[in-house]
Image (tube, coloured by chain):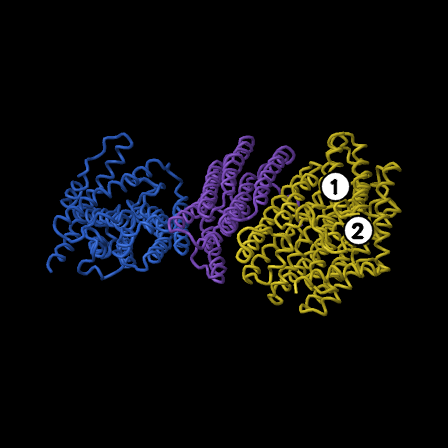
Amino acid sequence: MSPAIVVAVALLSPLAGAVGCQLIRSPRVAEYLNLAASVIVFVAILRLLPIALHGPYTLLHGYLIVDPLGAWVLLSVAAVYLLASLYSIGYMRTLHTPARLHRFYALFAGFALTMLLGPLMNNIGVYWIAIELTTLVSTFLVGFEKTRESIEAAWKYIVVVSAGISLALLGIILYYWGGSLILGPTYALTWGTLRSVAPHLNPTIALTAFLLVFIGFGTKVGLAPMHTWLPDAHSEGPAPVSAMLSGALLNTAMIGIVRFIQVIDAVRLGALPQTVVVAIGALSLAIAALFITRQTDIKRLMAYSSVEHMGVMTLGFGFGGPLGVAGALYHMLNHSLNKSLMFFGSGNAMHAFRSKRLGRIHHVLSVMPIAGVLWLAGAVAITGAPPFGLFLSEFTILRAGLAGANAWAVFVMLALLVVIFIGFLNHFRAMYFGENPQVAAATSCGQPDAADRFWRVLPMWLALIPLLAMGLWWPSTLSHYFAVIATQLSGDAR
Amino acid sequence: MTRPIFLQIAQVCAVLAIAPLLQGIILQWEERVQRAQGPGIFQPYRDLWKLFHKQLVVPETASFIYWAAPIVAFTCMLTVPILIPVLTNFPLPLSDMGDILGGGLILTLGSFFITLGGLDSGSAYGGIGAARSVMLGILAEPTLILVFVGITLLAKSMLPFVVNHLLAGQSAVYWGPAHLFLVGAFFILLLVETDRLPIHSSTHIEVYMIEEGRILEYSGPLLALLRWASAMKQFILYTIFCNVLLLPWGLSLQGTALGALGAAGGLFLKFSVVGAVVVAVETAQSRLRYYRYQEPLAASFVLAILAIVANQLR
Amino acid sequence: MFAAHLPPLARSLFSLLTITSLLLAFVMLGSRWLNAYLGAFALQSWLIAVLSAAVAYYGGYPELYGIAVLTALFRGLLLPYLLLRITRRLKVDRELHERLAPSSSLVVGGLLVVFAFVVSAHLGATLGLTGTIAVLALTTMLSMKLIGFLMLMVRSEVVSQILGLLVIENGIFLGSQILVPGMPLLIELVILFDLLVVVACLGVLVRYLTVHAGTTSTRDLTRLVG
């Protein structure tokens, strides 16, 4: 099957889903329409993975690119989209907003569409537009509940991210300018062009542009100190939206940073760009550690955990080398699955206890036995404890770091991971086993009906099982896949 | 050989003689714009005449500074015209005593002594006027320095005559953003230094007075000297603004008597233009709260910075 | 490259247009009245449109004439109109509580311009472009970016914040017209369109803010911290 057809299916199905949801205006139909779209997308992306392995294809006059790296990010997007679509069926019914539900699903599918577009974009300018579009669509998802807090979060989200990402546009224009000194005034600035022209670029322009682009897309990724929008947006959106933001959106911006790291590697500026990337990654970990230990809000806890894991990935890409890239990519998928699981669990807990405050959630197991166990397992996993995928990927990144020039960051990372491990799990200890004068039964009101509960527990299973599998066994096909990506990232440049 | 010396003396005398006239014209126009009759344009001369014939009253607390201040201020204002192109566009004897910065220093010295005199009089209003003028001075001074730096970068020289030649000769420089922004910045400074900010009324004695406050305790001939010095300061600043920055044309090239007379006439025309703009600005701009005095100065500062940046990238 | 070989008159023209645009950014920074912001923004957009046309004329890029027209229409008319509608609806006509007084922000803005100039002069020097129009474009681009960020920081009315974002965009657009006039038409069109969508989205959010949060000042948006 040609990549064009697969890509067309993957892009058109959410588009059709979004249009359909908006036109039919029935909440029940919209739920399943969106679900169908997400299933089709997931299957299409699974099909795309082996195709992409055979080298970059360009489609549509060079505006789209299908390469292994993009396909891998698309996989994480599609997986989270599928899980979140399943979960939102159960979750959104409990919000009692049936009149606007079809609009939610239309936006949801549209959001998925914009996120699928980003990694496929070959022209850097259009990639920037795609990232900007994700912001615009998801803003309304964040503000969907129309409470005072959610509107505030939406406003901060769009202003901070738009301002931040405009820095990336400035950097892209500087790159274009640098390239135009060599290639002549008019050319198409694709990833490939930029990479091939990189060795001839003026180093000062290249470095300035890289810093701008890194800060710009870093804002979207949620790296400290540009992360300020992230806890607000993640905590105030509905739980499935939080999962999409954290598990999928951040990755689509991360791929831009990865590709720009590749470009700056080709300019050969020495270790400086890598050091900047590693330092920002370490800073993100540090900020996340501070806020995780003293958090009082369950969803903000998850949001800062996202900052942490984006920092870990940035460290992996910053360390570079086949091992670092493989670890970071593996971490990307693991984190997407795990963070979806965590947000689903938080959504369930919020629904059961009618509060986001950590102090109000207690004796979780007595209120939601199955979902509670899954959530706890996810919490253990997300702190990087052994039997799960994140342990393997973090361990790989640590190994990659020891081999590189920025070995100091490994020790910083290790120390901060321990702090986060303790801080994060301490909150869960209090929620599950903590002594609380109030009786648990007093707050456990509003048991959902069985159908809703099915939709809200199923995606948690679907997220945890692959997570466990990937922790126990690193498939050799994946190793091969990451090796191809790593050689493409470094090999083309040298 | 003697002609340049005569010209130099004529320059100083021209400043001495015409300065009250400029004051009178501006005051009359301000009244006319507000649809009042206004005093005649020769009123400042009559005022000076009257003050010189009045008795002198000295506060008991006053020291010698009280006496020295008007004389120093007046002398300063007599010195500056030697340094700048008033009538001729070439340097005259002693013009090389100082550059733009030197002229600025002497102007500030005069102002400094008036402030001291105001404090020395021991009156509350003298203190208030002195405090306010120093506050404005503190904010205006950096901008003034920046404007000088901008002019220097523009002409690669600090001599006003060189700047005059450059601007009169090269229209590309004249119409460049660097020069235009410097004109804007200096215009605001001109408003500050000639006491025409929109935060107070310059013609009446009232609570928000600045210049009037400093010299409130003076009377008789000393007050006349101060008034005259203030008119001359205004005249000198207008001269620098017109002959160096805004309208560098129309000066005597050879220094003949006819040329000098023509230059004086030209000066009159230029001053009318600038005076009209000042009157228009002062009338159109609504009165502001006193504590917004820093805003025009900040604008002037920004203009000077933009001028310097633009100048680097011509 | 384009900016290196220009007749002196064209250089003066470009220099005047860019610096005046920068000055208009300062007008926005130094004013309290929302209508003054809007007017300055509209005028700035028109200047940028003139700049595009001038680049098209002197550089021989006929497609930039189209961009000039679109810039004037979109940025010079449509965006100010949309913002005017928002301000009318909000019944707010001035910034009430700045975090930094206009005069202080002017001075800070002046220092930011100096910083931008130092950075771009350094960049220009490595390329042997010292004192050319390219360095001026870079300076303006960076300064307007920094001034936009400053506006975002010190202003709290939602409309001022939108305008802060727009100043940033205008700066990038202005710089790109001089630095990379040959940028593909499609990208420029899409960026223009994108801006329109951003403002439309922000407009909807402003309406939500007034209805559900009961405020138009970001000073009141302090629920989410930590």
Query: Label 2 is found on which chain of the structure?
Result: A
Please give left or right for residue A331 compared with residue B241 in the image: right
Chain C appears in which tint? purple
> Residue A110 at x, y = what percent?
71, 39
Kindly identify which numbered label has been placed on residue A337. 2
Kindly check if marks 1 and 2 are in contact, taking CB atoms under 8 A apart as contact: no
Query: Label 1 is found on which chain of the structure?
Result: A
Chain B appears in which tint? blue
Mark 2, secondary structure of its residue: helix
> Residue C118 at x, y = what percent?
47, 59
Task: Identify the chain drawn in yellow.
Answer: A
Residue type at the position of mark 2: Leu
- The image quadrant of residue C199 is top right
A397, above or below A303, in the image:
below
Decide if residue B145 is in sight here.
yes
A193, above or below C191, in the image:
below
Please give left or right for residue C93 compared with residue A80 in the image: left
Mark 1 and mark 2: span between their CA atoms?
17 Å
Kindly identify which numbered label has been placed on residue A238. 1
Q: Earlier in the sequence, mark 1 or mark 2?
A: 1
> Residue B50 at x, y = what percent?
15, 42
